[in-house]
C-alpha cells in the first residue's frame, strides 16, 4: 500500500511515501489480536494478572520510555551513571516500540520534519485517527532521497545499545517465559501481550492527540506542526502529553511545568536527583527553550 504526499509544497527532504511494513504490522498486530482474544478470559481466571499488567506498564513507560529513552537518551536532559542509564533504556526497550538507536532515529526524523515550513501528514498526524494509526504502527515512511537523522555517535557506537538494537524484539521472550512459569497463561497474556498492546497503541495515541488539540502557551514560529497540552493524556502518559511544553523546552527533564500538569517522569528524575544519581538536570528556561518559541497566552 503506497500513499503519496498530500501536497506538492513539501520540501525535498520530506518527500516520500507511506509503505505498508509487513514485519512491523505483524509485530504490533499480534499484540493487539492476542490481547483482544485472551484478555478477558485471563483476567477472570487470574485477577492478579491485571495488577501485574498495570505495574509493569507504568514501570516500562515511565522509567523506561519517558525517562530512560526520551528524556535521557534522546534529549540528554539529565545524566546518570552508565549502569543506571543502561537499566532505564532497557526498560524502555521492553515497551516494544523498537531498539534504542532506532527510536532515536525515528524521534529525530519526526522532530526535524515537524519543525519545517511544510510536513508530510505521516509526521504531522493530520489524517483521520484510523489512518494515522495504520500509518504509524503498520507502515513506514520511505524518503525519495536519503535523510540523515544526525544520531549521536556515542549512542551509535555503544556496544550495549547496538546489542539491544539487534535484539529488541527478543528481549520480550525471557520475561514472557518467566511470567508463564510464575503465573501461567493469564500472566503471560496480561504481562506481555496486553502490556505491549496498551503501551505501543497508547504511545501512538498520545502523539496523535498532542499534535492536534488541547491548550497552548507557546508556538514555534515557522514550524508546520505545533504541540498541544492535553489535560487527561498529560496526566496518564507520565508527562508526555504536555506536548506544547515539550515542543517549547525540548531539552528539559521536566515536561509538566504548571502545578496542575502532572508529570510522573519528572517525579522519578527529581527522586534520582535527590539521591545524587541524576546529575546536570536541565529545567525549563532559556537554556532549554527552542529559539523559535514565542508566547501566545499567559503562562499561569
Image: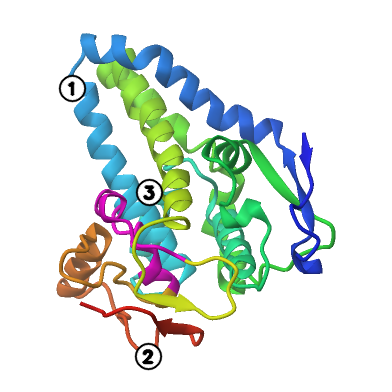
For residue 91, the mark is 3
Which quarter of the picture shows residue 271?
A: bottom left
In this figure, which residue is indicated by the disc labeled 2?
286
Verify whether residue 202 appears in magenta: no
Q: Of all residues shown, which one is farthest toward the bottom?
A: 286
Helix, strand or loop under label 3: helix
Helix, strand or loop under label 1: helix
- Choose the circle earlier in sequence order: 3 or 1: 1
* Residue 250 shows in this picture: no
Q: Which residues are magenta?
A: 227-247
CB-based contact (under 8 Å), mark 3 and mark 2 = no
For residue 48, the mark is 1
Q: Looking at the picture, how far across and down is residue 126, in whole percent? A: 58, 51
Disc 1/disc 2 C-alpha distance (Å): 47 Å
Label 3 Cα crowd, 10 Å radius (few <14 / some 14-19 / many 20+): many
Q: Of all residues shown, which one is farthest toward the front?
A: 297
Query: At 34% across and 46% down in the image, what residue appears?
Result: 60
- Above or below: residue 29 compared with residue 77: above
Label 2 Cα crowd, 10 Å radius (few <14 / some 14-19 / many 20+): few
In which quadrant will I find the N terminus?
A: top right
Q: Nearer the viewer, residue 211 or 95?
A: 211
Left or right: 47 as drawn, with respect to 164: left
Label 1 Cα crowd, 10 Å radius (few <14 / some 14-19 / many 20+): some
Amino acid at each position: 500500500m503506497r500513499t503519496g504526499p498530500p501536497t506538492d509544497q513539501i520540501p525535498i527532504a520530506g518527500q516520500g511515501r507511506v509503505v505498508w511494513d509487513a514485519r512491523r504490522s505483524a509485530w504490533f498486530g499480534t499484540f493487539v489480536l492476542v490481547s483482544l482474544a485472551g484478555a478477558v478470559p485471563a483476567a477472570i481466571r487470574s485477577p492478579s494478572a491485571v495488577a501485574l499488567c498495570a505495574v509493569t506498564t507504568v514501570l516500562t513507560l515511565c522509567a523506561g520510555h519517558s525517562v530512560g529513552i526520551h528524556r535521557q537518551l534522546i534529549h540528554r536532559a539529565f545524566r546518570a551513571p552508565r549502569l543506571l542509564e543502561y537499566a532505564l533504556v532497557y526498560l524502555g526497550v521492553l515497551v516494544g516500540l523498537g531498539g534504542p538507536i532506532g527510536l532515536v532515529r525515528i524521534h529525530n526524523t519526526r522532530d526535524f520534519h515537524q519543525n519545517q515550513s511544510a510536513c508530510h501528514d505521516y509526521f504531522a498526524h493530520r489524517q483521520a485517527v484510523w489512518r494515522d494509526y495504520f500509518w504509524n504502527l503498520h507502515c513506514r515512511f520511505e524518503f525519495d532521497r536519503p535523510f540523515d537523522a544526525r544520531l549521536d555517535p556515542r549512542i551509535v557506537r555503544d556496544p550495549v545499545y547496538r546489542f539491544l538494537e539487534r535484539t529488541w524484539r527478543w528481549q520480550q521472550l525471557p520475561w514472557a517465559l518467566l511470567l508463564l512459569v510464575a503465573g501461567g497463561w493469564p500472566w503471560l497474556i496480561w504481562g506481555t501481550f496486553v502490556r505491549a498492546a496498551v503501551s505501543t497503541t497508547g504511545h501512538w495515541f498520545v502523539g496523535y492527540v498532542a499534535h492536534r488539540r488541547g491548550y497552548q502557551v507557546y508556538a514555534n514560529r515557522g514550524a508546520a506542526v505545533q504541540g498541544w497540552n492535553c489535560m487527561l493524556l498529560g496526566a496518564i502518559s507520565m508527562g508526555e502529553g504536555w506536548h506544547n511544553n515539550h515542543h517549547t523546552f525540548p531539552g528539559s527533564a521536566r515536561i509538566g511545568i504548571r502545578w496542575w500538569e502532572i508529570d510522573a517522569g519528572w517525579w522519578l528524575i527529581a527522586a534520582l536527583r535527590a539521591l545524587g544519581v541524576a546529575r546536570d538536570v536541565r529545567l525549563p528556561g532559556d537554556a532549554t527553550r527552542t529559539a523559535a518559541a514565542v508566547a501566545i497566552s499567559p503562562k499561569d
